[in-house]
Image (spheres, helix red, strand yellow):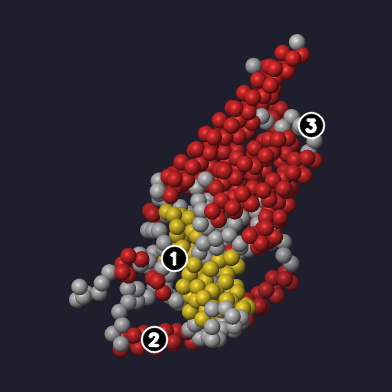
């Protein structure tokens, strides 16, 4: 909902943040693989269903980025916000590159130089701001779910 | 003992990796299946159903966001508003004169068409009688695709491929229709192509969208003169859009002798960053390609 209806009103340099990508990267860094990959697939699926792009582009891109982000699971202190904030920019660029590559393979015209210079970097910076604001929320959610696991 | 622990750990690691690989394989298969179903057209119903479910919430969120935007806009100073008012009055006067001239030309054109006994499928488009007003309730979640969602659909008479406009010019065409919402492909999307012509010189070309929300007019024949400031309209060629819809104004021309065609950058008259209300032209039926290939009457 935020991505489709609210995000366009938060534009900067003709781009808007990708809330779903930020959520998936944060969740992937805080959770083990089986748990996070399902959410990544679901997030990509929602993007595919609401977008005019060929189906599967964003599902595949989201799972790929989530798998890469999951490398950091258990390798850093979850309370440290610096790493997720620092990594969201390269992961945003990676997500865009993968999705653009898939779109081009599936026949959609892509202008690489303009995209990477004008849009991808600006969108990555917006995602960085969103990560700074919302990462503590994901930390809290992770603590809640871990507490439930321990109790069980 | 340490060796046994190492063996157990390696076994667990391999099991985890196998599980990860299996999950990835399952999701890859689902993605490929979804892609195949999409190509066959089966995912359209799912997309439409999802948009129908979320449409009320999208409208609510979009309304709230627009109200918040309006509140911030009210912070402008009185002096800025007065200056803007004067600029708009000047522009309105200029457009009024131009409108009168255009109406004269339209009348002359109609008389000439009648004289030539020229028949057309759509003799004219009455925006008031044959259009549906829609509010923009969302846009494509990705930064590289330019589509919008509007709150009118099949129940309001909207159909696929219908043109969408505002009072300022062409916006795009409907690509997906649900009962109460539709998805519109904007002309600034790289996948959009519109047959166009330059108003002054009647030079024809094709308007394509570019990343960043700009337009470029391509396939302009060499030797034809186009200049910055020229107005670009739809040509009606191909029957996908009505003719004479305003697209934009040429800002820059790129011409090289070794190229087959010229290219021009076009600034749209529509502000795509501030789209709130659009009109769907319901009286215009785009011609499907196969109709153009049918033989004329009297021929074998």
Residue B21: x and y in percent read 59, 32
Q: Using the image, tell me which numbered label, if any, was put on residue A77.
A: 3
Q: Dot 2: within a 10 Å radius of its alpha carbon, few (fewer than 14), some, or many (20 or more) residues? A: few
Say which chain tag 1 marks. B
Label 1 sits on residue: B163
Say which chain tag 2 marks. B
Residue A80: x and y in percent read 80, 35
One can see residue B150 in this view: no
Q: Choose top left, top right, bottom left or bottom right for residue B109.
A: bottom left
Distance Cα–Cα, label 2 vs label 1: 23 Å
Going by the image, does B39 lie left or right of A115? left
Nearest to the observer: residue B174 or residue A114: A114
**Residue at position x 63%, y 33% from top?**
A36
Spot the residue most to the front: B3
In the rendered image, the quadrant that contains the N terminus of chain B is top right
**Residue at position x 44%, y 76% from top?**
B235
Nearest to the observer: residue B270 or residue B38: B38
Query: Please, is residue B236 above or below residue A27 in the view?
Result: below
Badge count: 3
Work out whether disc 2 and disc 3 sit on a shared chain: no
Residue B50: x and y in percent read 47, 44
């Amino acid at each position: 909902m935020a991505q489709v209806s609210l995000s366009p009103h938060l534009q900067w340099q003709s781009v808007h943040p990708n809330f779903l990508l930020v959520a998936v990267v944060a969740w992937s860094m805080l959770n083990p693989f089986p748990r996070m990959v399902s959410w990544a697939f679901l997030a990509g699926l929602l993007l595919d269903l609401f977008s005019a792009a060929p189906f599967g582009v964003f599902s595949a891109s989201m799972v790929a980025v989530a798998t890469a982000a999951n490398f950091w699971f258990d390798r850093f202190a979850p309370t440290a916000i610096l790493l997720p904030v620092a990594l969201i920019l390269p992961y945003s660029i990676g997500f865009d590159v993968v999705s653009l590559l898939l779109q081009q393979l599936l026949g959609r015209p892509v202008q690489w130089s303009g995209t990477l210079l004008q849009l991808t970097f600006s969108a990555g910076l917006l995602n960085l701001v969103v990560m700074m604001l919302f990462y503590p929320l994901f930390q809290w959610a992770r603590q809640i779910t871990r507490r439930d696991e321990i109790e069980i | 003992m340490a060796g046994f622990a190492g063996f157990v750990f390696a076994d667990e690691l391999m099991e985890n990796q196998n599980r990860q690989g299996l999950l990835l394989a399952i999701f890859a298969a689902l993605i490929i299946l979804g892609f195949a179903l999409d190509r066959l057209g089966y995912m359209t119903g799912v997309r439409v159903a999802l948009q129908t479910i979320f449409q009320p919430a999208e409208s609510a969120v979009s309304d709230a966001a627009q109200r918040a935007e309006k509140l911030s806009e009210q912070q402008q100073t009185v002096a800025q508003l007065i200056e803007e008012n004067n600029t708009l009055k000047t522009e309105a006067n200029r457009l009024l004169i131009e409108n009168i001239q255009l109406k004269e030309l339209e009348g002359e054109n109609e008389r000439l068409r009648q004289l030539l006994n020229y028949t057309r499928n759509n003799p004219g488009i009455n925006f008031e009688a044959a259009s549906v007003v829609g509010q923009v309730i969302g846009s494509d979640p990705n930064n590289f695709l330019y589509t919008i969602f509007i709150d009118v659909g099949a129940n309001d008479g909207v159909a696929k491929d219908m043109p969408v406009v505002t009072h300022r010019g062409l916006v795009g065409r409907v690509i997906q229709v649900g009962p109460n919402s539709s998805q519109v492909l904007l002309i600034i999307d790289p996948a959009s192509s519109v047959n166009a012509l330059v108003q002054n010189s009647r030079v024809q070309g094709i308007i394509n969208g570019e990343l960043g929300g700009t337009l470029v007019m391509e396939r302009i024949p060499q030797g034809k003169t186009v200049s910055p400031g020229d107005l670009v309209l739809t040509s009606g060629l191909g029957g996908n859009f009505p003719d004479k819809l305003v697209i934009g104004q040429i800002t820059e021309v790129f011409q090289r002798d070794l190229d087959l065609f010229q290219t021009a950058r076009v600034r749209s008259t529509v502000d795509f960053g501030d789209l709130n209300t659009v009109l769907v032209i319901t009286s215009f039926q785009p011609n499907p390609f196969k109709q153009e290939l049918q033989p004329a009457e009297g021929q074998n």
